[in-house]
Image: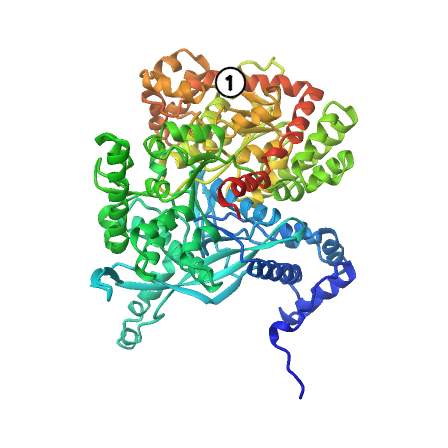
Amino acid sequence: MIKTPHAADLPLPKRIASDPDALAAEIMEKLTYAIGKDAKVATPHDWLTATILVVRDRIIDKWMESTRTTYHNNGKRVYYLSLEFLIGRLMRDAMSNLGLMEDIRQALTSLSVDLDVIAGLEPDAALGNGGLGRLAACFMESMATVNIPAYGYGIRYVHGLFRQQMAEGWQVELPESWLAHGNPWEFERRESSYEVGYGGTVETITSPEDELRYVWKQGERVIATAYDTPAVGWRGERVNTLRLWSAQPIDPILLDAFNAGDHIGALRESNKAESLTRVLYPADATPAGQELRLRQEYFFCSASLQDIVRRHLQQGNTLAALPDKVAVQLNDTHPAVSVVELMRLLVDVHGLDFDTAWDITSKTFSYTNHTLLPEALESWPVPLFERLLPRHMQLVYEINAKILLAARKNRGFSDSEISRISLIDESGDRRVRMGNLAFIGAHSINGVSALHTELMKETVFADLHKLYPTRINNKTNGITPRRWLMQCNPDLTSLIKEAIGPEFLDDASKLTALDAFADDASFQQKFAAVKRANKEKLAALVASRMGIRLDPNAMFDIQIKRIHEYKRQLLNIIETVALFDQMRSHPERDWVPRVKIFAGKAAPSYHNAKLIIKLANDVARVINNDPSVRGLLKVVFVPNYNVSLAEVMVPAADLSEQISTAGMEASGTGNMKFALNGALTIGTLDGANVEMRDHVGEENIVIFGMTADEVGRVRADGYNPRAAIDASRDLSQALAAISSGVFSPDDRERYAGLMQGIYQHDWFMVAADFDAYTQAQRKVDDIWTDTPGWYSKTIRNTARMGWFSSDRTIRQYNADIWRA
């Protein structure tokens, strides 16, 4: 009798060939049999998909091997819950980490296809807004690189964050249809589908053991279906999983309604479900917008927790062992409802008593805080929370009672302290505080820079820190050097490799060997040539998209980040206006040619941020067309900032603007990317700028302005911005020009209110720091004119940024928090 082998015992075909000829043959095979195209009629998009499928085959081998090893070892896994994953394009990332870049390039060249052309066609995954989402993407890559078994959990947004266009200088939001033609990187996992419910009622029943149990009778339900994307580590040694949830209705069409002629109403359940994963950060200025945001957050948290518990039990583990096998990291407050959802699963579904469930829950979760802004620590109106999640509201009250009673009895908390640590904010309309919930439900709470962590203890979480004095710790953010040096700046990578050898490719701390070349004239010339080429690439992009010509000989002064008043793009614009005035008034001075480059998106409902974008464009229009500045100053706002645009702008920067109001930026990661690529930083002592100064040396960074302590004292003492404005002629003249309509002749009053805000309260200290900022910019000019001195400083920035690798950050998370 012939024994038929079990499918699991059959060997898988290994995609190991990596020579260009074999790869070219595979690409042709994919083009023919997976895409159904002849090479003669294949479009660039067809070649892109075929190439991705060839690279993907090699990833899958490693992916399955990594998964099998993790299951076999039954070790601890890390689950990273984030509402954003700003992963950008994946093909170059995967090819670089697998060491396939040049072989694929040669293979495509033999097929008369340009790798750079088709790679530029890959859409950016529109799954994030800014630093929060990009950090999550860097962390996923680093967790795979340092061999930590991990899943990322998020939402598979159909449109994600909006695509930004400019209409007469105003931001216009359009849908970003990154999934319009499918996504060859993802795999649908229909077997990993879970019901997620909302509304309804909670019934009390008595169990056979005469215990009270609670049954949530959900009023509506949707299906969460998993889509998995592989997350490849450096050299492909481990591949982890990014699992994103898509929402589907229980009944896709109401046939009774359709047959009765209500063709639109028959699809209401489908539309309601699909709206959950349609757009990232729907505007929450309306009650309907708030409800959709809360529905989104609960949807992905519930699906993720159900999946985590299912996987844990499937491996034969007990619920009591959950903290030993599972580490759930909450990336900011968006996933904070996970704390209550796990409690619901443990108590209501699996029958654990409340105290046992709470012990398991608090040992399983850890929480990363990303902001000191109270408005960014989410809270939800109690009536909304209770209507959508009635059982969770009961559990919130039960958790709150447990915590508050213990704080009063064991720690002697006063009424005011009790009110501040409570999960219910009663200072106005009653709201559920998600930041407090995340803090109370986690065994570890970390800040993302040394300064931010200390300020957490003193400000937003002062009372909770008093209650739990050992929970807060610091994990300074990092960036993956694979994406933010090797891929986005291959010429600099090659130059460094030529100078110090390849060891830094595996260990970014080895970059310090580059210090020895900082004053070497020959190396400086090569370094400058790389920078020049990168500036020419950015200049070509700006010319093609915007029709503006930039001089690569000028200093490229770049500020790219989310548009927000605390990030102080407005300070930069006002100083630009003052510089413009000085250049026109004093043509005899030896001015340094500058190109001021801005990019970033404003939240659709954030009026002042959108007005700042319009101001940048208005200022650019006037300055760029004024012959009296003789081309020495140009201003550009590049629309639709995303990861792919950042990969061009970061290597091209001479000067990196990191000028947030001290005490308000949690960390920042753009500052790290710029410095790693050889830009000089001008910045305040805020976020990770503090640690960057310590690592690169204060002589290699330009620091200005008040410290966080000084900002606090000035505010407490009754800050008078008008006095600061009156004392600064350049500032007062610039504000007057903007206010009076010099840059907005079509609407003289357009910026009057924005400027009046600086006169009246100036919460973000634009006036207070203006003169110091101006002086710092002139110091930058002086450094620029000393060419050897400039490159000495920028080379040392690159050499000393290895500590800011996200590999180091992840190892610290694992050593101190996860222990996976």
**Nearest to the observer: residue 632 or residue 301:** 301
User: Amino acid under label 1?
Assistant: Thr
Q: Is residue 396 above or below residue 108?
A: above
- Give residue 266's position: percent from left, percent from top: 30, 70
Q: Is residue 477 above or below residue 306?
A: above
Q: Identify the residue at horizontal 65%, vertical 53% (top origin).
A: 237
Q: Say how the picture is coloured.
A: rainbow
The residue identified by callout 1 is 774
Q: Identify the residue at horizontal 48%, vertical 38% (top origin).
A: 600
- Give residue 401's position: percent from left, percent from top: 24, 43
Q: Is residue 642 left or right of residue 221?
A: right
Q: Is residue 248 above or below residue 583?
A: below
Q: Is residue 146 above or below residue 651?
A: below
**Outermost residue, top side:** 727
Q: Is residue 505 left or right of residue 703?
A: right
Label 1 neighbourhood size at 10 Å, few (<14), some (14-19), many (20+)? Answer: many
- Give residue 45's position: percent from left, percent from top: 61, 60
Q: Identify the residue at horizontal 65%, vertical 72% (top origin).
A: 33
**Nearest to the observer: residue 175 or residue 791:** 791
Query: Can residue 813 be seen in this snapshot?
Result: yes
**Quarter of the image holding residue 167?**
top left
Query: Can residue 543 be seen in this snapshot?
Result: no
- Give residue 253's position: percent from left, percent from top: 34, 71
Element on which disc 1 rests: helix
**Nearest to the observer: residue 2 or residue 217:** 2
**Outermost residue, front side:** 209
Q: Is residue 102 left or right of residue 761?
A: right
Q: Identify the residue at horizontal 57%, vertical 33% (top origin).
A: 672
